[in-house]
Image: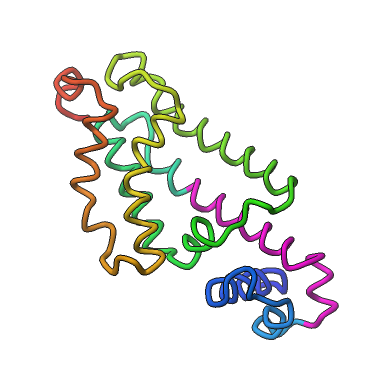
Amino acid sequence: MSTAREDLLAAGLAVFDRDGFEGATVAEIRSRARASNGSFFHFFTSKKQLAGTLFLEILQTYHAAIITAVNDTHGAGEGVARLIRAHLDWVVTFRREARFLFEISRSEWSEEVRGAQRTENSRLTDGIERWRAPLLARGELLPMSATLFFSQIIGPAQVFCRAYLSGRHPGDPREQVETLIACAIRAVVAPGAQERAGGTS
């Protein structure tokens, strides 16, 4: 059974998805969650704080899906493919959460949220680097910063995802997965890496 806090967060997500951040009201969120005014303010000081909490919880879920997609048994090419598939699958499976994370979240939210976001982003980087570092050391991945690597893997896929989330493109972004994987492999995997890894990358 969900808690009052979880009900409020779920209601907030639904109302933000329908009305946007500016259009959403505490009254509408409370009504959807069947929560009293006192219950809302017991957990959150404002709509903005609820939105920031929701942002961080969704971000953690997204990062977990990405980090768990790869481990030290996956070679360079296979790992790249798994990261792209994990991103696309998460966006399509959790479309409402993805819209909030990538389309609705606000840059002016509190520094407390931004600080927690930086911590979460560091955890994502650390998780990916545990897989990537040995492949870099063996020359199976091209040398580049962690930020550049992630942008080459997720950036192009995110273009399709944003069009899908905004409704500009009705097609499932996973329809482009093989092309996105092939392009990412050319961008980050060292030539001959698959042969060096015995064809398992």
Residue 84 position, x and y percent, is: 32, 45
- Asked if residue 29 shows in the view, the reply is yes
Relative height, residue 7 to residue 132 (above, below): below
Q: Would you say 76 lies left or right of 150 here?
A: left
Residue 184 position, x and y percent, is: 26, 36
Residue 7 position, x and y percent, is: 66, 74
- Asked if residue 1 shows in the view, the reply is no
What segment carries the magenta color?
A: 36-64
Write the residue at 72% across / 63% down: 48
Relative height, residue 29 to residue 131 (above, below): below
Residue 112 position, x and y percent, is: 75, 46
Write the residue at 43% across / 44% down: 66
Q: Would you say 149 lies left or right of 183 here?
A: right
Relative height, residue 13 to residue 136 (above, below): below
Residue 114 painted magenta: no
**Near-viewer residue (36 or 150):** 150
Residue 51 painted magenta: yes
**Near-viewer residue (196 or 141):** 141
Write the residue at 49% across / 34% down: 127
Write the residue at 35% across / 18% down: 143
Quadrant of the drawing holding the C terminus: top left
The quarter of the picture where residue 131 lies is: top left
